[in-house]
Amino acid sequence: MNSFITNNDGIVLKYVVGNDDFSIVGEVSSKIKNVLKQLNIDNKLIRRVSIATYEAEVNVAIHSLGGYIEVTITENEIKIKIRDNGPGIKDTKLAMEKGYSTASNKARELGFGAGMGLPNMKRCSDEFKIESKFGEYTELNMKFIK
Amino acid sequence: MKISKVIELINGEILIGSIDDSINFAFSSDLMSDVLAFVNEDTALLTGLVNNQVIRTAEMLDLRTIIFVRGKVPPQEVVNLAKERGMTLLITNFTMFESSGVLFKNGIEALRISNE
């Protein structure tokens, strides 16, 4: 379920990301980017958020059983939370290494699976946290300072 | 460099967009992961991939010009996605090497990547 809430914490957007249709991967990131543009956020910041969000969306589609992306926009920062329904990452330290990848051939045909996604998200964000329980879930939390 | 000049140099065709647009930098890759990791300026993208993810990648980076090399032609669905985003799409039978080479020789600049 997609939702759009405004409360005291700011604007909270939540989008479901599936794992079955590669052709629509990027739609959620595109929607998020459009909202950020409408809020007149600095273009360079929008670009950093967009790259990180898109990389995350690709990861959810390629590696997980589906999940969601939640964006919280406050006066001073943009927070992005991505959580999936598993299967989780065995070794998150290894997953963070440039060039390490477990992506399928299908993902590689699309131009992904180079083992650059997680390091790139870290590069783009001001704060980056990855948490995963193998067999259960992976959760990323990124913060972007305005 | 004007798109019209780019078309002449790579013996290409324009699918959508404007020949009056211009480019100064270019990046050639079939790996969208690398495009997302290294491209951070207003740059033309040369690629042999013709799926939606090329357009999505360009969209996230605010890239406006994509040159499809090696005679690859994107399907209509992909062209439509680019059209909605105001992009310029070119096609050429040149290989990625030759397309890149001829553009570089005529003044299109490469990006400098940092591997911090």
Image (cartoon, grey):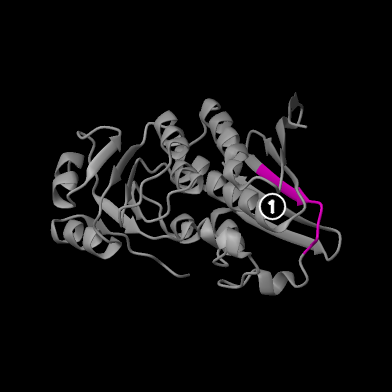
Q: Main secondary structure of the magenta part?
A: strand
- A118 or A58: which is nearer to us? A58
Which stretch did the figure color magenta? A79-88
Q: Secondary structure at mark 1?
A: helix
Give x and y (percent) for residue A33.
55, 36
| Corner quadrant of residue B109 | bottom left
Mark 1 chain? A
Give x and y (percent) for residue B97.
26, 65
Q: Is residue A92 toward the left or the right of residue B75 in the image? A: right
Residue under label 1: A60
Q: Is residue A85 above or below residue A95?
A: above
Which quarter shows the N terminus of chain A?
top right
Q: Is residue A126 toward the left or the right of residue B83 in the image? A: right
Q: Is residue A19 above or below residue A103?
A: above
Which quarter shows the C terminus of chain A?
top right
Q: Residue at x 60, y 41 (%)?
A: A24
Q: Residue at x 21, y 35 (%)?
A: B19
